[in-house]
Amino acid sequence: MRYLGQLAIYAAFAVLIGYFSVAPSYTHAPTDRGEIKLSFSHGGQKRGGCRQLSAEEIAKLPPNMRVARSCPRERLPLLVEMDVDEKPLYQETLKPSGLSSDGAARAYRRFSLPPGPHRIALRLRDSDRSQGFDYEGGFDIVLQPRQNLVVDFRTEAGGFVLR
Amino acid sequence: MGQIKRLLRSVFAALDRAFDRPFGPAWNPFHNLGALGFFYYWIVAVSGIYLYIGFDTGVERVYASIERLTHVQWYLGGVLRSFHRYASDALVVMMLLHLAREFAYDRLRGVRWFSWITGVPVLWLVYASGITGYWLVWDELAQYIAVATTEWLDTLPIFGEPIARNFLARDSLDDRFFTLLIFLHIAVPLILLFVLWLHLQRITKPRINPPRGLAVGTTVMLLALSLAYPAVSHAPADLAKVPGLLHLDWFYLAWYPLFDLLSYKTMWGVAGVLTLGLVAMPWLPPLRRAKAAVVDLDHCNGCGRCAADCPYGAVAMVPRTDGRPFAQQAAVSDSLCVSCGICMAACPTSMPFRRTSELATGIDLPDPSLRDLRERVHEAANALGPGPRVMVFGCDHAVPATAIAADGVAAVGLPCIGALPPSFIDYVLSRRLADGVFLTGCREGTCNNRFGLRWTEARVDGLRDPRLRKRVPRERVARCWADHQEASHLAAEIEAFRRALSALPGPDATPPVAASASHAPVGAP
């Protein structure tokens, strides 16, 4: 009787472990929709140009750090916009990273969309201009259910790219 | 907080009783939660070594290598993979039950804070070990965990580049990633082992191995589960697709659906509050500590019994400082002493018979002292009514003394039943302060001070110093270990003992000796 009791407890524990190690199942994202992931890392232009230092200013610098020009480290924030099917979906001003704001600004956003054809328009401003954008791109896509479409930004590729 | 503890304690007490029937106190899994946790850790480690041999860290080959182990070599690799998985799950169950039990029995406040605090990183490390393990399989579940974990980590402003960008597309990952991951999956459990070692530092004789029968039973159970319900992978990871239906291991991954329900930042808040809450718990509220045991060198001969019996390593034997002709003396560390009194009972000089104006012992509690104890014994004896008179010595953590006292039954409460010097049993019976002595304390395997019950039984049975003298009539000594909910069962046992005493010839008709500590009984034992 005692061993039967032990057997029952072991069996119950096994069922508990076996069941909850795989169940109940979970759906993280709807399986009938696709996803666009906008993610990039890009440094905005430097805030202000380089300046020629005067002889007095150079003299004040430590001997091993004397340079003729002073260039600011701080970068400009990025303005990013994304439209899907000609409707604005996303707009954000991304601050540069780093304690001195001299690092790249980073974007990482996910958007759930119904499957089917879509027109994506993207714009990015990384300079101190007040109007317009430095980079623009557009893609005609046919999104599949559960598709993960990544939109990246690469200066060397000329702007926005699909991955 | 107190109500939650009481409620949980009742639940555990009920489970203890239920599991005692089939397993007995020694094999009861609830008395071996920590040891079972260690046991599962070793199963995971050993099975993990074999899986590592068959594991390929190439990003295109990692999934296939695990599939090969699971399906082609199902009889060994597949079984060991399942064994690895299910033992990890069982480890989480044991860890959480152990945490809840220690909380319920209030084994976290006062000097016990150290074991509790060092247990908090264990939680994080166990989860980190399990999560990196699921990540290694590189199936859809691993992809989901990878993306969610890195997105969560990216909300901390510590990474130059978002680490989630490593999982953007198929070309984002390279072979080095899985090399790093397998390193983490080995390094984190090794760090865990070190923290577990720290976790045990302030207790003596820690039980890190379950009884052999329980170990065999749980191993067979895990093997049977592994054969009947083998662990399998999801479809291979595909970063071009969003993971679909996921069969989560809720023991490790219950946290992840909360990311979808709440925000990542909120979940950092939840994790922070939970962690800080656990860290602060030993001081919520602070324990009003009883004073630590004190060594009286005039009565200490350096025998070392107190150090051997202390459950918390609070007593150490150090070189003699008073010039007396003994090699050592006892020294108490205030920061480790829980004032359980076990050392006092272990001291051979803790003799109530001693003919001195002031009863003293080699190591004593300031409150209650040995002298206080003798006074309380006399007070209790004086209050005893007619009939077979029973003196009960009980533990304050079990059924309270006030609930035990009845007609013909007097109870003396102790911080632990292990704080009762065996000579007191002899004293009560030989001085005819009562007709029988009844010992009670925490249920077997649940002693609040770890070894109180074990040492008491060994002392009374003559197996451990200081032993109960042979002249003590054993038929006049009884014991019953019962938890705080078993007052009626205890009362019935005491009543049965009284009936048994009434059938015995001899001193039951003798009236109690009216005495006080100042008129301490005289004469040698």
Image (cartoon, coloured by chain):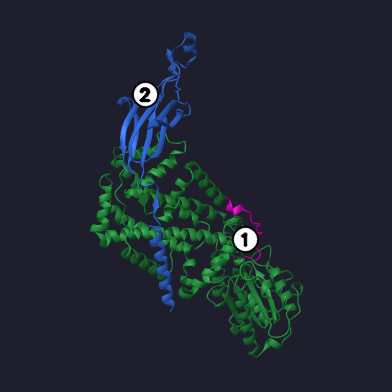
Chain colours: A blue, B green
- Circle 1/circle 2 CB separation < 8 Å: no
How many numbered tags mark residues here?
2
**Is residue B92 in the magenta section?**
no
Q: CA distance from mark 1 to mark 2?
A: 63 Å
Query: Which quadrant holds residue B358?
Result: bottom right
Which quadrant of the figure contains the N terminus of chain B? bottom right
- Residue B16, compared with residue A24, is above or below; it is below
Q: Quadrant of the C terminus of chain B?
A: bottom right
What residue is drawn where x is 36% and y is 57%?
Answer: B85
Examine the rendering and report whether any part of residue A97 can be seen.
Answer: no
**In front here: A113 or B55?**
A113
Q: Nearer the viewer, residue B55 or B78?
A: B78
Q: Residue furthest left?
A: B72
Residue type at numbered disc 1:
Gln
Disc number placed over residue B83 in the picture, else none: none
Chain name for mark 1: B
Residues in magenta?
B280-301
Q: Image height check: is B140 above or below A41?
A: below
- Check the image and report above or below for B14 versus B79: below
Query: For the residue labelled by badge 2, is the local secondary structure a helix, a strand or a loop?
Result: strand
